[in-house]
Image (spheres, helix red, strand yellow):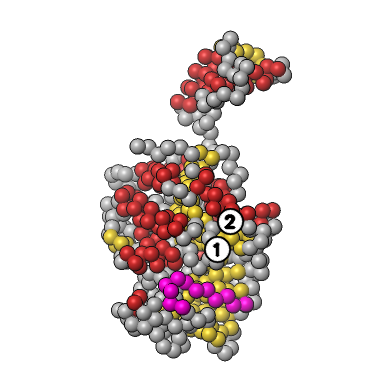
Amino acid sequence: MALVIPSDTNVPFAGNPSGDMNNVADMLGLITQVLAQAGEVITTSNPTAVAAVQALQAAKAGPGLLPRPRLYAPAHLRRWRVALALATQQVVPVVVAGDSIMWGTGADNTTGTTNATAIVKGACAQLRAFFGAAPRTLAANPGEGFIFPNDSRVTVAGSPVASAWACTPFGQGYRLIGATQTLTITIPTGVTSVGVIQGNMDQAFNAAGSNLADVRGLYNINGGGNIALTTLTNTNLPIVTNVAVAAGNTFQVLGPATAQTYIAGFILNSAAANGVQIHRVCLNGAVSGRLLGGQTSGTLDKTSGQQVYAARSVYSYCPVPGVIIVEFCVNDQQFQNGGGAASQNNVTQAKYLAWITQFANQAVADGWCVLMLGTMRDSGYAPGYPQVDDYLNALKNLALTTDHVAYIDAGEVWGGYAFSQADGVQVTSSVHPNTAGHGDLAALLYDTLTATLSSGITELAPA
């Protein structure tokens, strides 16, 4: 069947196809010339065709408005492009910092997802699988990466104190003192080494407690003799000790005999010496203030100096910089006027933007780039304004005006709450992605990070 394409005596590009192609008429004119030469077109009025396309656009359909991912400020990910180029030679990190969405809630098509399911079906797990099968990484999978010390697989004994320590990601770590305070994990299948992350804090950080600088902890395997972890330098930057293990081993970390050590997390590694490692630093119910050590009813919990420690604890255990995917919004916006826990309430749009900006600026200064991620829309049950779109537009504008920060929004692909529910990418009556939704989020991020998107966009931020 012949294709109907417009014809006009003043067809754009009629002798100069290298000019500007910024409007529908120009594009239609160029297509007309190409297809007409093949004898595959029937011509009609160019203005009529343009009007038809514009009508489709006004109805939010047609060219340029089909669901497709759009990366804002793609040039701002050039540090990541360089990092990925080395993934055949070394392990390159992707840190995912977010709430329950990227944690994996909904991955089993319910809102009661267990950690055991989230770590194999959630978006982070599926993103890890994509990279682990990719030619760009020589099909190497370096392992699960970061886990919190209070992960469901870790047994805590001796009542170590968990007091939202600023030197631990999202305040989820423990302070260990003495050999009776322990953290124990049975090594999962495929893990050949475990990294123990110590906070490495100085005397000033502990002034209100022991007033002593941190001292290295100990570890043992299968209840054998205790061995010292790496000697600490008390620089307030984490130190990682990598210990060779085998699947099924009982690996235990103990507190030092004097002073204290802070355990910020563990890193589960495979035998692979290269590839992309996905670190899931995500917490159910979290808001953006967690990036800086937590907040209470709209006020950050930590001092300015401790906020730096908190920000760096999210990513500084990685030996080289990579990219940090930041996914926060739903809880921040939902509880902007209260209604949640004190740790969630009163994050106004201004505070949300200020806190994420502060985190991003710190990460960029430390050599990383940041990809802001907008996710699926909720039903809009939070009273008043701003709404979710307003919060996320603030992130987009941040990316457009800040070097090394980019933005992509799954909501632009899936549409609003009604559309994503109807299309089957969300758990019924929930904002959380279902199994398919987690897979699509992972695919979107993989395509973004491997530069296989159909196009990128760089535009000016609104005045």
Q: Is residue 413 left or right of residue 341?
A: right
Q: Is residue 244 magenta?
A: yes
| Residue at 69 percent of width and 53 percent of height | 135
Counting from the top left corner in percent of width and height, residue 311 is at 41, 63
Question: Measured along the vertical axis of the image, is residue 108 above or below residue 256?
Answer: above
State which quarter of the image contains the N terminus.
top right
| Residue at 43 percent of width and 50 percent of height | 430
| Residue at 55 percent of width and 25 percent of height | 21
- Can residue 98 be seen by looking at this rendering? no
Three-letter code, disc 1 = Val
Counting from the top left corner in percent of width and height, residue 65 is at 51, 32
Q: Residues within 10 Å of mark 2 (few under 14, many from 20)?
A: many
- Can residue 69 be seen by looking at this rendering? yes
Q: Is residue 345 magenta?
A: no
Question: 118 or 460: which is nearer to us?
Answer: 460
Highlighted magenta segment, given as a residue range: 233-245
Which badge, 2 or 1, is on the more N-terminal residue?
2
Question: Measured along the vertical axis of the image, is residue 350 above or below residue 141?
Answer: above
Q: Which residue is mark 2?
A: 83
Q: Residue furthest top?
A: 9
Question: 150 or 83: which is nearer to us?
Answer: 83
Q: Are marks 2 and 1 in contact (CB under 8 Å)?
A: yes
Q: How many numbered dots are placed on residues in this image?
A: 2
Indicate the quadrant where residue 18 lies. Answer: top right
State which quarter of the image contains the C terminus.
top left
Three-letter code, disc 2 = Ala
CA separation in Å, label 2 and label 1:
9 Å
Counting from the top left corner in percent of width and height, residue 181 is at 44, 84
Q: Residue furthest right?
A: 38
Question: Measured along the vertical axis of the image, is residue 235 above or below residue 406?
Answer: below
Q: Which residue is mark 1?
A: 320
Of helix, strand and loop, which one carries label 1? loop
